[in-house]
């Protein structure tokens, strides 16, 4: 099975959020019988890069679609490539932003999903597009802070 793994950039994760994301990625890659991981090669790090690193550790083939330029036109093209190649798309995003996150906007709302259950991620757009193609698209929400 070819799985597209997309999601939030590194700055949107705490150390705990990154550890939890990597753990969940490893578990899913082993459980799902994945033969290839497709990623968007985000220049800001995060899920795209962590998924590739974890896949390579497990000896899983990787295909990356970096955008030709850093603008929505090229992100969109890249996201469509991911959705078309993958049988299933998994989007990892966070429930809340780290306290030290600098850029602001859409902190408590994802306009792609019309939800307050997680913050906005371009990966949500890719997941929704995959669903329109009749594929499985799942959004996985990671907590950046331990629950009491």
Image (cartoon, grey):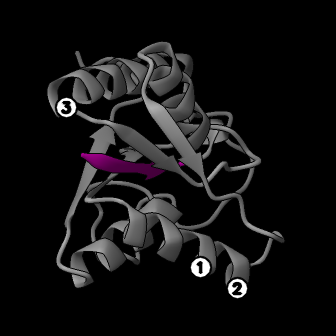
Q: Which residue is mark 1?
A: 76
Left or right of 105 on screen, residue 27:
left
Residue sitting farthest toward the right:
69
Mark sitting on residue 95: none
**Label 1 crowding class (10 Å Cα cut-off): few <14, some 14-19, many 20+?**
some
Range of residues picked out in magenta = 1-8
**Quadrant assignment for the C terminus:** top left
Which residue is drawn at the image coordinates 45% and 19% (left, top)? 59
Left or right of 71 on screen, residue 104:
left
For marks 2 and 1, give the CA distance: 5 Å
Mark sitting on residue 33: 3
Q: Can residue 138 be spotted in the picture? A: yes
- Helix, strand or loop at label 1? It is helix
Proximity of marks 2 and 1: CB atoms separated by less than 8 Å: yes
- Helix, strand or loop at label 3? It is loop
Which residue is drawn at the image coordinates 55% and 17% (left, top)? 15
């Amino acid at each position: 099975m070819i799985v597209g793994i997309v999601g939030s950039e590194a700055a949107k994760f705490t150390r705990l959020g990154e550890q939890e994301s990597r753990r969940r990625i490893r578990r899913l890659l082993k459980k799902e019988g994945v033969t290839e991981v497709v990623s968007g090669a985000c220049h800001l790090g995060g899920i795209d890069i962590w998924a590739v690193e974890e896949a390579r550790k497990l000896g899983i083939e990787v295909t990356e679609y970096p955008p030709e330029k850093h603008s929505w036109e090229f992100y969109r093209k890249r996201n469509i490539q991911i959705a078309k190649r993958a049988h299933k798309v998994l989007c990892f995003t966070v429930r809340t932003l780290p306290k030290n996150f600098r850029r602001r906007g859409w902190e408590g709302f994802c306009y792609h999903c019309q939800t307050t259950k997680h913050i906005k991620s371009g990966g949500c757009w890719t997941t929704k597009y995959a669903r329109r193609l009749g594929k499985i698209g799942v959004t996985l929400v990671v907590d950046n802070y331990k629950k009491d």
